[in-house]
Amino acid sequence: MVLYIDPPLWPAHGTHFSHLISDESLAELHAFAAAAGVPERAFDGDHYDVPERRFDDLVAAGAVPVEGRILVRRLIASGLRIPARQRNKSLKVPLLNRWNSIMPGHDALFLDLLDRWSEDHRHYHGCTHLLAVLEALDLLTDPDDPPRTVLLAAWFHDAVYRGIAGQDEEESARLAEERLHGAGLPEAEAAEVARLVRLTSDHCPEEGDGDGALLCDADLSVLGGDPEEYARYVAAVRKDYAHIGDADFAAGRAAVVRHLLELEPLFHSGRARELWLAAAHRNLKGELA
């Protein structure tokens, strides 16, 4: 078993916090924290939040310092990770930290996107979905060289959401072009983000489109969750379309599920197929049945 700690980059209560995790056992994590004098109230489901003043002595006690993305990967691999959608806490801080890693100094744009993802009518297509897509990209990309255009496309891919397939993606793409151009991104980079956003309307990137494959795979990663997670996803989608009657929703949803089952490939990268394909087919066939 290994204990990991990331740098103290998470602002709260007038200081910055690190995350302390185990790669194997919550019991061992609790034992380490108790021995190091970390209070029980600092535990948050799958990790301890520890203030920056404790960072050096926890490393001295045996915690291995790693970059934040690596820590998330270790936690997911351990099986101890609590998905973002199961958390009741505001996602503003983790999303802000991720935003600042790719667009530092553009707080106004972050707040505008956060407001969009937090709209009251969103149930599945909200902040938890955004964070889930970003976490899926953690698993599919090199943590030392994350593709900025793909990450920005994740931020914008459902920035406009009214439940109108095709139109939502087109308006989100136009928003990305407008706002990123205004933020000073080169025109070609903003255009690439918009291109990637448009791909999420059908999740069919052309062969050789590696960045398009990354975004589409991450966006559909929810299909490969465990049965309980998949059931929550379907229930949330139903709430997104609460204005549609049961019979019409069932018919429309069945068409979507059949389309997903007919996609070949459903996931484009070998890593995504390894992580999610078998479970996705099980979940989709079960829902259709």
Image: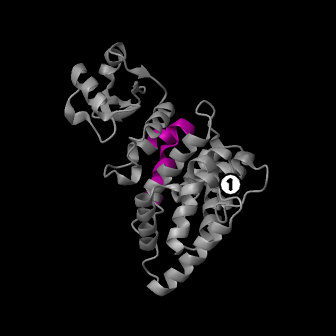
Residue at (49, 27) in percent of width and height: 67
Q: What range is drawn magenta here?
A: 96-116
> Residue at the right extreme?
207
The residue drawn where x is 58% and y is 56% is: 278
Q: What percent of the width, then of the height, locates residue 193?
A: 67, 51
What amino acid type is highlighted by mark number 1?
Answer: Leu
Q: Classify residue 273 as left or right of residue 284.
A: right
Q: Residue at x 25, y 34 (%)?
A: 42
> Residue 99 magenta-drawn?
yes
Residue 90 to residue 244: above or below:
above
Percent position of residue 284, x then y: 55, 67
In front of the other: 142 or 230: 230
**Is 226 positioned to the left or the right of 260 in the image?**
left
Image height check: is 41 above or below 258? above
Relative to residue 96, is residue 22 depicted above or below?
above
Q: Is residue 187 magenta?
A: no
Main SS, magenta residues: helix
Q: Which residue is mark 1?
A: 196
Q: Which quarter of the figure has residue 260?
A: bottom right
Q: Quadrant of the N terminus?
A: top left
Query: Looking at the picture, how far across and down is residue 183, in whole percent?
Result: 60, 45
User: In the image, is 140 to the left or to the right of 59?
Assistant: right
**Could you say which is closer to the camera, residue 109 or residue 26?**
26
In the image, residue 144 lies at what x, y percent?
60, 30
